[in-house]
Image (tube, grey):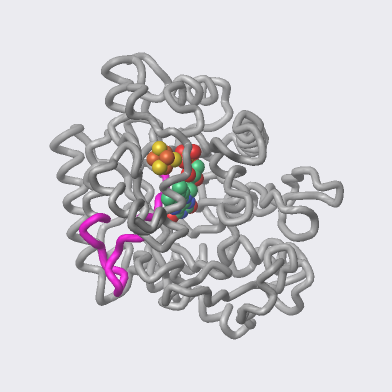
Amino acid sequence: MNNILNTPLSIYGRQIPNRIVFHPMEGCDGKENGAIGELTRRRYLRFARSGAAIIWFEATAVCAEGRANPRQLYLNEETKDSYSELLAEIRKTALDECGYEPLIIVQLTHSGRFSKPNGTPEPIVAYRNSHWEKGKENQPYTVANDGYCESIPLRYAEAARLAQEVGFDGIDVKCCHGYLFNEFLSATEREGRYGGSLENRMRLYLECVDSARKAADKLFVTTRLNACDCFPYPYGYGVNAENEIDLSETKIIITELKKRGIGLINLTLGNPYLIPHINRPCINAPEDGKIGMERIYGVTKELKTAFPEIKFIMSGLSFEGENALDYVSDALSDGVADLAGFGRMTFAYPDFFRDYLQNGKLDKSKVCLKCSKCTELMRNASVAGCPVRDSEVYMPYYRRDVLKK
Ligand SMILES: Cc1cc2nc3c(=O)[nH]c(=O)nc-3n(C[C@H](O)[C@H](O)[C@H](O)COP(=O)(O)O)c2cc1C
Ligand code: SF4
C-alpha cells in the first residue's frame, strides 16, 4: 500500500519498516513481585502480531516504592527472567507473523505522586501543590528530599542495565503525565538543587537520562515527554501566566535531550488523573474531542518544526476511530510528526494496521469507541484491557470491579 504510514524510517541507525508505534499501555496485570503475568503475556503477543514497527513497553517501575499499583511491572533481579522470556516470544511471534521484529522500548518510571505500591496512595512528591491536593490535603505526603533524589539515578542505572540484559532495544526515561520527573519540571517554589530555576527542575530527569545511557551502552535512550501539563499557572509547566500553552521551556529541555543523543521523542501532554481528556480525547468529556485533537496536533507540529532532526511520535489518535489512520497519514505527510502512536486502539483492535494495509480501511466494528472503560478498570484497581472489544476476557473484570456485580 502506497501510504506514508507504510514507509521505512531510520531510528538511531536502525531501519524500521513502517510508522506505527504501540504506545505504552499499562495493564496492571503483572505479578506481585513485578514479573510478567499471564494477561501481560497475552497482551504483548497480541501486539506482536500487529505489524507495528515499535512496541513501547508499558510503565515499568525502577523501585518498589515508586510502583503505581501492586501489579505494576517492576524490572529487577528477581523478575528479569520473565522479561527475557516474553521478549523472545514477542520477537519470534512478530517474525513468524509479519516477517520482521519490532523495536521494543521499555518505559522506566517512578510514579511519584501516584505511587500506590500497596494499593493505597503513598505519594512521593516533588513539592506540595494545592491544585493537585484539593480535597486530599490530609493524606500523608512524602516530599522527595535531595538525598532521595540523589539515589534515583542509581535506580535508573540498575533498571537500564537489566533492560539491556533481558533484551530490550531502547529505554524510555519517562517524564510525563504528572509522574515524578514531570512534576519536578514545575517545582518553581522548591528550594535546593532540584527546584527553582529550569536548570534545577530538569536536573533529576537529565541525570537519569545520563545514568541510563551509561549503564546500558548498547541500547538507545528515548523519552516520553509532556509537551505541557495544561494546568493553570503556576501549577504545571508549559503554561504561561495568561494560562496559554507556552513551549519555551519545553524547547530548552528538548535541546538538553538532543545534546545527550536523544533522537526520538514520544510526545504527550496533560494529566490522566485530573484532566484525562487532554491526553486522550474521549466522549463524555468537558470539551469536544476535536478541540483536544487540535491541541495535540498544534503542540506536536510546533515542536517538530523547532526540531526537524528529532523523530516525534504523535499521540491521542484513537479518538479518530475508523478514520485514525487516514487522519494521521495526512498529519505525517504535512510534517507534524514522524510516527503514529496508538494507545487505546491497541487494546481494542490490535490488528488495525494489518487490516488497513490489506483493505485500505479499518473495520468499524472493531475500532476503539473512546468510552474510557479501560481507564475505569484501572482506576478501580483492576486489570486494564478493553471490556468492549475484548469482552470475553475483560468484561468479567469490568462487571466485578467497576459495576460491582
Ligand atoms: C489503560 C491505559 C493505560 C495507559 N498506560 C500508559 C503507560 O503505561 N505509559 C504512558 O506513557 N501512557 C499510558 N497511557 C496513555 C497512552 O499511552 C496514550 O497516550 C493515550 O491513551 C492516548 O492515546 P490514544 O488516543 O491512542 O489512546 C495509558 C492509557 C490508558 C487508557
Ligand atoms: S474500553 Fe473503550 S476506550 Fe478503552 S479501548 Fe475499549 S473501546 Fe477504547
Q: How many marks?
A: 0
Residue that protrudes farthest toward the front in the picture: 405
Q: Quadrant of the N terminus?
A: top left
* First to last magenta residue range: 23-40
Query: Residue 108: which quarter of the image?
Result: bottom left
Instruction: List x then y, in percent, for residue 58.
Output: 39, 55
Residue 233 makes an appearance in the image: yes
Residue 234, horizontal then vertical, whole percent: 79, 59
The front one of 371 and 304 is 371
On the picture, is 119 further left or further right than 240?
A: left
Residue for point 36% across, 17% down: 361
Image: 395 above or below 27: above
Is residue 79 positioned above or below 311 on the image? below
Q: In this orientation, which residue lies closer to the viewer: 217 or 146?
A: 146
Q: Provide residue 353's location: percent of width, then percent of height.
A: 33, 28
Is 4 positioned to the left or the right of 278 in the image?
Answer: left
From where the camera sits, is residue 344 visible? no
Residue 148 at x, y percent in the picture: 56, 82
Instruction: Name the residue nearer the viewer: 261 or 237.
Output: 237
| Residue under the image location 51 percent in, 62 percent down | 209
Check the picture and name the quadrant holding the C terminus: bottom left
Which residue is at the far right?
Answer: 242
- Write the residue at 24% across / 48% down: 393
Q: Main secondary structure of the magenta part?
A: loop
Instruction: Tell me which corner region of the image, top left, top right, bottom left or bottom right, holds residue 253.
Output: bottom right
x 57%, y 56%: residue:
273
Residue 20 colored magenta? no
Q: Quadrant of residue 142?
A: bottom right
